[in-house]
Amino acid sequence: MNLGARLGGAALFVAAVASAAALVHFAVVLLVPIVAAHDAYARLAELGPPGATLALPRGRPNEKRFPWSDPAIAASVCRFDLSAGPVRIKAPVGRAGFASVSFHTRRGAVFYALTDRAATHGQMEAVVVTPAQMRFLVAHDDEDNPTQDLRIVSPTVQGFVIMRAFSELPSLYPAAADQVQMMACATEPPQ
Amino acid sequence: MVFKAIAVGAIGLALGVVASGAMLADPPFGATTIGPWRVAAKAGSLEADPYTRAALSRSGEIPLALGEGLKLVAKIDSAGRPLDRRCAYRVGSRTPASRYWTLSLVDLDGYPVENAAGRYGFRSSEILRDGDGGFSIYVAAIAHSGNWLPIGHVDQFALALRLYDTPLAASAGAGGIEKASVPKIEREGCA
């Protein structure tokens, strides 16, 4: 075997390895969100059942479940499952300096957010629906009496909402924690 | 021939997995650098790239929506040197416009670091300010007068700056934050 053929063989080998590595790499990156057993949704499931407003543990050194939690923020979460119907979220705006609600897919991505600037009558309120539920609701809307509801289509049937309230001072953290505990998330009664 | 095929598969698999692990620990796309700070404004959104999505699934972080605020993370000082627990830093003296901001110290996984003072961050609403409204936060392992943010028991750490309800959110993805508007992280000396 001459030198040229050897080099050619080595180059082919390196190219084959690189292609295999690239394939594995892309497969891993695309599969991780689907198979991740310990994503945010799974961690929230450890706190309690869907449909319940649960306090998110405060960011502390000994609390290793929810990274990048701001210690100045009190938060509560509610997992939703739209298979039984739309879910209405009501979050009261209290005395906290800043409050917000964000809506997340099963994989954790944000698909909508409200802040206290968008509150009406002291509430941040929205109805989370599937695309099919949205079509049904729109088809049955009363044209003379338009709905006041803010309807938000969720890309996934399951997901979660998180309410955050900012504590302006350490001594105001308990008040912020009380405020986020007042978020309600309930499946709408069938029409 | 068979041996070569097996070698290609095995090396490719190993390289692919190692590359994936490394890239998901620090997603390569979607983040903007402003001075020492990195901001991935769209990390939590439905438009996030596959690397950022996979990293989010693995970390379990519940991201802020753009409408709620922005999270900026620094692992280096303003001169580009990695943050070092043996050194003291002055962070200041301005932040981009926002209703509130917080500065907190975390380990590289995003969790607060245990320290004797029990202080994990500062809020814009509790901080001591200069006569002209600017501020200085001293990040150091040993006590410092003024706004002292202890480094605590950790080898490597990061600083997280959160801007709540900021008009920058809309432009942050396009690099709309000016370098002059973010706090500097100046190394003051090392033990």
Image (cartoon, rainbow, N blue to C red):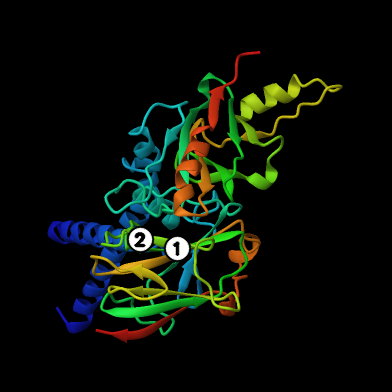
Numbered circles on residues, count: 2
Instruction: Tell whether label 1 touches label 2 (CB within 8 Å).
Output: yes
Q: Residue at x 55, y 43 (%)?
A: A102
**Figure check: B123 above or below B34:** above
Mark 1 Cα within 10 Å, few/some/many (few <14, many 20+)?
A: many
For residue A3, which quarter of the picture? bottom left
Front-lying residue, A185 or A173: A173
Element under disc 2: loop
**Residue A161 visible in this rendered orientation of the protein:** no
User: Measured from the top left, where is residue A157 in percent x and y?
Assistant: 51, 30
**Figure check: B92 above or below A120:** below
Front-lying residue, B131 or B14: B131
Q: Chain of mark 1?
A: B
**Figure check: B4 above or below A66:** below
**Residue B8 visible in this rendered orientation of the protein:** yes
Residue B119: image tag: 2
User: Measured from the top left, where is residue B78 in percent x and y?
Assistant: 44, 81
User: Measured from the top left, where is residue A162 in percent x and y?
Assistant: 50, 40
Q: Residue at x 64, y 64 (%)?
A: B171
Element under disc 1: strand
Could you tell me the amino acid type at mark 1? Phe
Mark 2 Cα within 10 Å, few/some/many (few <14, many 20+)?
A: some
Residue matched to label 1: B122
User: Measured from the top left, where is residue B31 in percent x and y?
Assistant: 49, 66
> Which quadrant of the rendered structure holds the N terminus of chain B?
bottom left
Residue closest to the far top: A191
Work out whether disc 2 and disc 1 sit on a shared chain: yes
- From mark 2 to mark 1, how far is it between C-alphas? 8 Å
Could you tell me the amino acid type at mark 2? Arg
Q: Chain of mark 2?
A: B
